Image (spheres, rainbow, N blue to C red):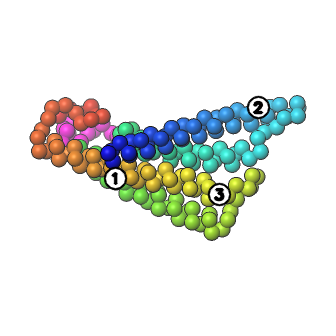
Amino acid sequence: MIERLIHRAALSLALAGGGALLAMTGLTVVSVTGRGLIALGLGPVPGDYELVEMAAAFAIFSFLPWCQLQRGHVTVDLFMAPLGRRVNLAADLIGNLLLTAAAGVIAWRLWLGLQDRLSFGETSFILGIPLWIGYVFAALGAALFVVVSAYTALRSLRELRETTAAPTSGPPPGKGWPS
């Protein structure tokens, strides 16, 4: 049940991030086209940089949980592959624990940044959008990143225990390591 909830939350957030990227692309095309057609009375979209900046922050943090859940982060299999399955599972566990800690620090700092933006009431220069709005969306993604990272650490621990208790043939799910 928890596994399915985490999967759906990470996927939903990644899809929303994809929507934000599509919106950023559309906004950029319209704004650049407007700049190119100034002679015809058109112009750039006011505040396009501000909007793209906020959407990019959201998009980045919306993809991290899904990437972590799908084991999509970069690994150095070249050196680890010869060490065998158990060593690789232990390395995965350590990596997931370290990433959970890093995700926690990122979420904590974003939370502090959000508090700072709320207390000072800063707004964007052109559109006057409160800056805390961008922090809220980034912090939500970072919070889910912490949850997913902790889940993947527990998943790695479970896989390591299962392999230690009853060795099986074949690589762990999502990996191509030799036994």
Residue highlighted by disc 2? 33
Q: Give the magenta part as a residue range.
A: 73-88
Mark 2 vs 1: CB contact within 8 A: no
Tell me, for residue 134, which label it has, or none: none
**For residue 142, above or below residue 170:** below
Residue 98 in magenta?
no
Q: Residue at left 19%, top 38%?
A: 84
Name the residue carrying label 1.
Answer: 150
Callout 1 amino acid: Ala
User: In the rendered view, would you say 92 is above or below 178?
Assistant: below
The image quarter in which residue 26 lies: top right
- Marks 2 and 1 sit apart, C-alpha to C-alpha, by 45 Å
Position of residue 162 in the picture relative to residue 38 (left or right): left
| Disc nearer the start of the sequence (2/1) | 2
Sequence-wise first label, 3 or 2? 2
Name the residue carrying label 3: 131
Q: Secondary structure at mark 1?
A: helix
Q: Secondary structure at mark 2?
A: helix
Does residue 86 show up magenta in the picture? yes
